[in-house]
Image: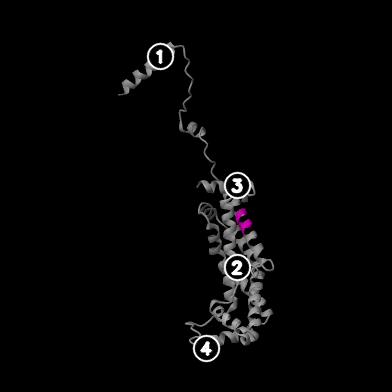
Amino acid sequence: MQGSKTVAATIIIAFFTGCNISLPTITVPTNISEINAKIAVPKALSQEEAGQGLKEALKKGVANGTEGLMKPGGFAQSLAYKILLPEEIRNLEQKIRGNALLNAAIGKELDKTIDAMNVGAEKAMSKALPIFTNAITNMSFMDAMKILTGGQGAATQYLKTNTTTQLSQAFQPEIKSALESVAVYNHWTPIVNTVNKNKKLLGLTADVNPNLELYVTEKAMSALFQEIEIQENAIRKDPINRTSEILKKVFNYADQN
């Protein structure tokens, strides 16, 4: 079989030679390094580039994510993030609002509570940025590569894992201060105690947690991580959000991997 191929090749070459047709000179690479040199292979990221690019993206994301939420009205005027009364009380709120006497007695106090919860969440956001920055700064190369190639939400999940405890501890004093500024607990605690004493009558199976700081803290952190994930995914999805050369290089690499 090999012999027949050689004969055929010889005949073809002889034909072209006889017809005075010049065959093009073809240079065939003789080793793998020459072959690789002729193929456009994306340059791999160095550890420094991967770390620098991802940290820049994360800092940009958390800055944008916290900025909107910490502004006055960042929670209170947001359709997505406004903090409402705990669900158990919210069900009773409709009855209170619908009763002229109850609404006159309690309605304004509930309004104050809702306002204070949202103001507390807005003020707490100022505590988030340094906590996030510290977590980003201490990120390892392996963490950076996992996040880069982990797809949407990977960076947000990393921050959630590494900052939730610190955020909770930092948020609660700010939220407590906002609640106390309108003397929320003067009327909130009696309302909750009354509800818990009459929970069977009201159709509840468990006590309402009177700790508003914890409730508001959880809502504030949930909103914060949702907003950061939006910012992260915008950088991943749309090249127009890659506003520096290092961001372009790092996330182009992520797109291909």
Mark 1 touches mark 3? (CB < 8 Å): no
Coordinates of residue 129 in the picture (x, y in percent): 64, 63
Looking at the rendered image, the disc whose residue lies closer to the viewer, 4 or 3, is: 4
Q: Specify start and end residues of the magenta stretch as a single range.
A: 56-61
Q: Which residue is mark 4?
A: 197
Task: Residue 50: give x, y in percent of width and height.
Answer: 57, 49
Q: What's the CA distance linking mark 2 and mark 4?
A: 31 Å
Task: Answer whether residue 210 is visible to the viewer in this image.
Answer: no
The type of residue carrying mark 4 is Lys
Q: Nearer the viewer, residue 30 or 101?
A: 101
Q: Which tag, 4 or 1, sits closer to the chain's start?
A: 1
What mark, if any, has residue 248 been given in the picture?
Answer: 3
Name the secondary structure under disc 1. helix
Q: Position of residue 162 (x, y in %)?
A: 55, 63
Q: CA distance from mark 2 to mark 3?
A: 31 Å
Sequence-first disc among 1 and 3 = 1
Res 1 → quadrant = top left
Under mark 2, the amino acid is: Tyr
